[in-house]
Image (spheres, grey):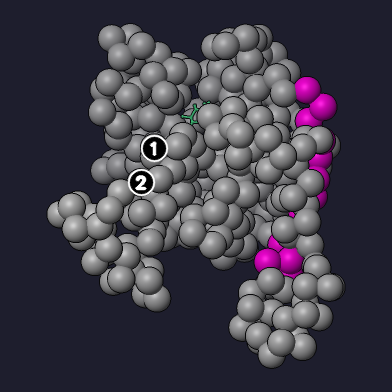
Amino acid sequence: MVRKAVLPVAGWGTRFLPATKSMPKEMLPIIDKPVIQFIVEALAGVGIDNIVFVTGRHKRAIENHFDFHPELEEHLKRAGKEQLLKEVRDIANIINPIFVRQKEQLGLGHAVLTAEPAVGNEPFLVALGDVLIDEEEKELERLLYLFNKLGKSVIALMEVPQEEVSKYGVVKVKELEKGVYLVEDLVEKPAPEEAPSNLAIVGRYVFTPAIFEALKRTKPGKGGEYQLTDAMKLLLEEEVIYAVKVEREVYDTGNPLDYLKTVVNFALRRQDIGEEFKAFLKELLEGKVKV
Ligand code: G1P
């Protein structure tokens, strides 16, 4: 049974500077909820409430976000804002956060290995903050269902346009049944002409603890960093890895343009502000509002 998740959150967020100079990129809001909270809520929703954050010196805001905040709660209580009070309490209540410091940022693989003492010898999920998935709980449930059935690591994949493969880890697979694959090879951020397919790693993985041994054997790869994708390639020598294609929409939050598209998308679907925002966008595009 998978009881723990590892969330690597120690990156600098250089693509969002200067916003991320003193604020973790994972705290960037999709309107009024930090990106990381969407992921944590989905994990809690599938019963994974031991969350190992692999964090760094400049990430204190994440620790505070998943903790109680007595002064704020007292203020909300006195102001009679019961709903908000419940929301801020729930953020701290739904998980058991564990913080591990990654002293040097040597890559995603290194970040996951840093979590080993907190994970121990049991399977675990890894979720990256760069993407959000519609109805994420359902996708996580599929990953966990396959893991429980097959007993080996399972990763989530999505189809991307060929010219975008160089942004992702890309896999060579054999389809076992519709949307379920056996992984045959993996390559981190290949050039489009070298990519074995256009199936990209989404950033949601369920691993057997054997990944830790593979990570220890991994040498620096793309960008001189210890890559998780390279460790999976080594893991393949010992164990099979399965993959499943996500069925729902994936939203990129890892760079300013895609982040903005995600915010607009989520805003349009909000019950409270969606209609008004849509009318505004329409007027804007028709040149009726000054830009
Ligand atoms: C990381 C992984 C990559 C994966 C991607 C998904 O890359 O290294 O294999 O496809 O996340 O978002 P990053 O986006 O951190 O450069």
Residue at 62%, 49% (x, y): give it. 27
Q: Could you tell me the amino acid type at mark 1?
A: Leu
The image's mark for residue 257 is 1
Q: Who's the residue at 57% across and 48% down the image?
A: 28
- Residue at far left of view: 286
Crowd band around label 1 with a 10 angstrom C-alpha radius: few (<14), some (14–19), many (20+): few
The quadrant holding residue 175 is: top left
Q: Position of residue 11 (x, y in %)?
A: 66, 31
Q: Residue furthest front?
A: 290
Q: Position of residue 41 (x, y in %)?
A: 58, 62
Circle 2: element type: helix
Between residue 58 and residue 146, name the one nearer to us: 58
- Residue with the mark numbered 2: 261
Q: Which residues are magenta?
A: 91-104
Would residue 99 be counted in the magenta stretch? yes
Question: Which of the 4 quarters of the picture holds residue 185?
Answer: top left
Q: What label sits on residue 103 in the rendered view? A: none
| Label 1 beta carbon within 8 A of ligand 1 | no
Identified by mark 2, the residue type is Lys
Percent x, y for residue 9?
Answer: 67, 39
